[in-house]
Image (spheres, rainbow, N blue to C red):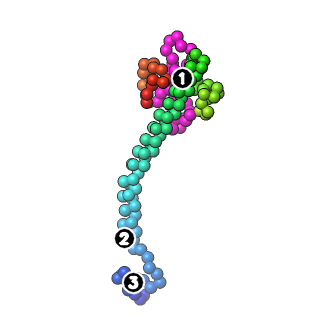
Amino acid sequence: MRRTPSSHGRTARAGGTGFTLIELSVVLAIIALLLLLVTPRYFGALDRSKEQVLSHNMLQIRAAIDQYHADRGRYPESVRELVELRYLRSMPVNPVTESTEWDTVLPPPGEAGRVFDVRRPEAPVSDAKPASAAQD
C-alpha cells in the first residue's frame, strides 16, 4: 500500500481520507461536555416556564371565581362550572401535573358553593382568603 502526503502534513492511505478514532473520540467528548453544561439550564428554564404558566392559570381561575361570585352571590360548585357558564373559555391545564383537575379551597362557613379558591397541589391548606387577595 502506497502512502502519499496529505495537505495537512499527515500521510493518507491511498483510496481515501478520513478521521481517526482518536479525533472522533475527542469530538464526541467535547459534545458530551457541552451537553452536560447546557442540559441543567434547559431543564431549569423548562421548570420555571411551567411554574409561570401555572401561576397565570391560577390567576385566571381566581378572577373567574371572583366574577362568578359578584354575578351570582355565591361561589361555584366546581371549576368546571366556570367553563360551562363561560366564565372561562376552556378548562385550564396544570402544566406541572398535566391535568385539568385543581385542588380547591372550600368557602368560609355560611357561604354557598364549593370553590372559594384554587391552590397548588403541593401547597398546604391555609386560612381562607378571598380569591382576589390570594397571591402566588
| Residue visible at 56% across and 27% down in the picture | 64
**27 displayed left or right of 102:** left
Q: Which amino acid does label 2 sit on?
A: Ile
Task: Determine which residue is flagged by label 3.
Answer: 6
Q: Which element carries disc 1, helix, strand or loop?
A: helix
Local crowd size for mark 3, using a 10 Å CA cut-off: few (<14), some (14–19), many (≥20): few
- Report the mark closest to the observer, 2 or 3: 3
In the displayed structure, 107 sits above or below 53; it is: above
Q: Which element carries disc 2, helix, strand or loop?
A: helix
In the displayed structure, 86 sits above or below 40; it is: above
Q: Which amino acid does label 3 sit on?
A: Ser
Whether the magenta-drawn stretch holds residue 103 is answered as yes
Task: Determine which residue is flagged by label 2.
Answer: 22
Q: Do the residues labelled 2 and 3 touch (CB within 8 Å)?
A: no
Q: In which quarter of the image is the C terminus?
A: top left
Q: What residue type is labelled 1?
A: Asp
Where in the figure is residue 61, as x and y percent of width and height? 54, 29
Residue at the top extreme of this rendering: 110
Task: Determine which residue is flagged by label 1.
Answer: 66
Q: For marks 3 and 1, give the CA distance.
A: 77 Å
